[in-house]
């Protein structure tokens, strides 16, 4: 499958930003912890969600879509093992370990897949489970975990891993006694997972900080939860407005993305909240309007380093590599989270970018023009970056392996159309 983007047009228009992928995936794993129906509103229709729900359906859960509402009832789940093919589809499948352990005291899963952006081991998850009294064994690419002892009440992660933090939370909410998680990840998606779990009756405090305290409860109940907008998807379409000298208005749910607004200002955009906070459509989650416009090209940024929240997000790194390739001046981007995340540089170079990569650093010397080319998405975020580059380039950019973009972006061609960008998606001949 490929997407073709026609460059040279200004991104102008209005867009409502979809629900957050990295928030919804752990929630889907969390539905395992409850026997009642859980409804996720504003759930993005993306391939990673499909892969996670296919796993749930396969182990006996009922999964039903109604528009953008996803209803899951895991009451009759009876299989405690997830097979290779299913787990290989999406890396977040590792979060079913926490969900299954919490509900059944045991779990088996084949090693998970996901984007090819480095080694992505799960040793932090396993070490944390071990401290919590879980015995695990790895054999033939399968991990088998069994709750054997009460374990310690305090767990310290060696690094604030997002996935390991989520797995500990998922396991701890039904675990007897109190679990204190230290050096926890602070990403907004962790806070959202905790909001969601609290709406099911979980007792969690401290999320958003280094230490999260979870007091185990006897049972969780069903809920209806409205997802906030995806901060990286917001940045992707905002980058298109920035890159093309455009002017776009984004309706976002539940958050005003103050850090993301600041990243856009750094590269020279005007960004402001219009004050049109819209009527909440679902429950208590309000909508905000953020406007992004750029009349004066992209400004270089001397140094950006990715890191755990609140540092610059690694998921936005590829987007900025694309943006800065046409900036006035030289920028340095350093990647500190994943070791293999500059592969998109080779594709941007094909389009005329001047990017030199040495280890975990990329030096980007801005060029005056990029040209349309046939390029390849190498992972989800590199695919998104190539869409942005396509908007910036002269002529047509053809992005092959665009199915990777659909892992995290809902109807990207249609969304670009909302901003007046000509794009089309087609299957390989
Ligand atoms: C999540 C996000 C991903 C984002 C990343 C960092 C989801 C579904 N995915 O991925 O989009 O890029 O956070 O913000 O939410 N590590 C280990 N051992 C472990 C776990 C992690 O060495 O057991 C390393 C990883 O290889 C990586 C770093 O720690 O270098 C960060 O990983 P982590 O925060 O766990 O990312 P994910 O949860 O996989």
Image (cartoon, rainbow, N blue to C red):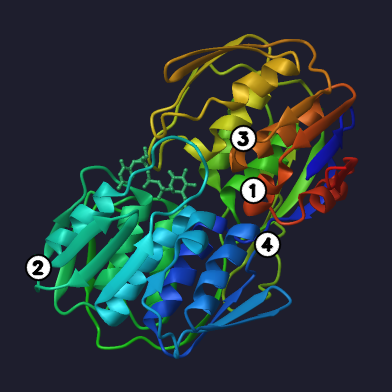
Residue 70 image point, x, y percent: 62, 77
Give the residue displayed 66% in from the left and 60% down from the top: 46
Figure quadrant of the C terminus: top right
For marks 3 and 4, give the CA distance: 37 Å
Q: Of marks 2 and 4, which one's residue comes earlier in the chain? A: 2
Near-viewer residue (12 or 149): 149
The image shows residue 315, relative to residue 206, as above or below, that is above
- Image position of 155 (left or right of 417): left
Q: Which residue is mark 2?
A: 151
Q: Which mark is residue 378?
A: 3
How many residues crowd mark 3 within 10 Å: few (<14), some (14–19), many (20+)?
A: many
The image shows residue 413, relative to residue 332, as above or below, that is below
Q: Does the beta carbon at disc 1 come under 8 Å from ligand 1?
A: no
Residue 389 appears in the figure? no
- Image position of 326 (left or right of 117): right
Q: Which residue is mark 1?
A: 233
Q: Of marks 1 and 3, which one's residue comes earlier in the chain? A: 1
For marks 2 and 4, give the CA distance: 47 Å
How many residues crowd mark 1 within 10 Å: few (<14), some (14–19), many (20+)?
A: many
How many residues crowd mark 4 within 10 Å: few (<14), some (14–19), many (20+)?
A: some
Q: Are marks 3 and 4 in contact (CB under 8 Å)?
A: no
Q: Are marks 2 and 4 in contact (CB under 8 Å)?
A: no
Q: Which residue is mark 4?
A: 277
Residue 417 image point, x, y percent: 87, 48
Q: How many numbered discs?
A: 4
């Amino acid at each position: 499958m490929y997407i073709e983007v026609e460059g040279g047009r200004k991104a102008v228009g209005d867009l409502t930003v979809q629900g957050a992928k990295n928030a919804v995936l752990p929630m889907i794993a969390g539905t395992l912890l409850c026997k009642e129906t859980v409804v996720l509103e504003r759930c993005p229709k993306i391939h990673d969600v499909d892969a996670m729900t296919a796993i749930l359906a396969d182990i006996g859960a009922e999964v039903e879509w109604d528009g953008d509402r996803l209803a899951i009832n895991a009451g009759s789940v009876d299989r405690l093992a997830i097979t290779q093919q299913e787990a290989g589809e999406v890396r977040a499948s590792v979060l079913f370990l926490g969900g299954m352990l919490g509900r059944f005291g045991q779990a088996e899963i084949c090693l998970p897949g996901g984007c090819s952006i480095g080694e992505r081991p799960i040793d932090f998850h396993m070490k944390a489970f071990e401290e919590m009294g879980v015995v695990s064994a790895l054999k033939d690419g399968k991990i088998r975990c069994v709750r054997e002892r009460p374990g310690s009440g305090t767990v310290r992660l060696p690094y604030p891993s997002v996935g390991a933090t989520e797995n500990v939370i998922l396991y701890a909410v039904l675990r007897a006694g109190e679990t204190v998680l230290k050096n926890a990840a602070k990403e907004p998606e962790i806070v959202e997972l905790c909001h969601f779990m609290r709406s099911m009756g979980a007792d969690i405090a401290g999320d958003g900080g280094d230490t999260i305290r979870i007091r185990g409860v006897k049972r969780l109940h069903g809920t209806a939860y409205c997802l906030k907008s995806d901060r990286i998807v917001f940045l992707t379409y905002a980058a298109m407005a920035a890159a093309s000298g455009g002017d776009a208005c984004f309706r976002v749910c539940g958050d005003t993305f103050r850090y993301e607004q600041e990243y856009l200002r750094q590269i020279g955009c005007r960004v402001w909240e219009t004050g049109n906070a819209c009527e909440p459509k679902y429950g208590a989650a309000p909508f905000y309007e953020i406007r992004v416009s750029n009349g004066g090209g992209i400004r270089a940024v001397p140094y950006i380093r990715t890191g755990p929240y609140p540092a610059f997000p690694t998921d936005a790194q590829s987007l900025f590599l694309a943006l800065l390739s046409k900036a006035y001046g030289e920028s340095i981007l350093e990647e500190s989270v994943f070791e293999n995340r500059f592969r998109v540089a080779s594709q941007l170079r094909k389009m005329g970018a001047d990017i030199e990569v040495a280890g975990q650093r990329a030096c980007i010397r801005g060029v005056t023009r990029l040209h349309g080319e046939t390029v390849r998405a190498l992972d989800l975020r590199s695919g998104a970056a190539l869409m942005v580059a396509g908007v910036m380039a002269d002529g047509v950019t053809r992005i092959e392996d665009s199915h990777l973009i659909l892992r995290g972006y809902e109807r990207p061609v249609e969304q670009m159309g909302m901003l007046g960008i000509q794009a089309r998606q087609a299957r390989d001949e």
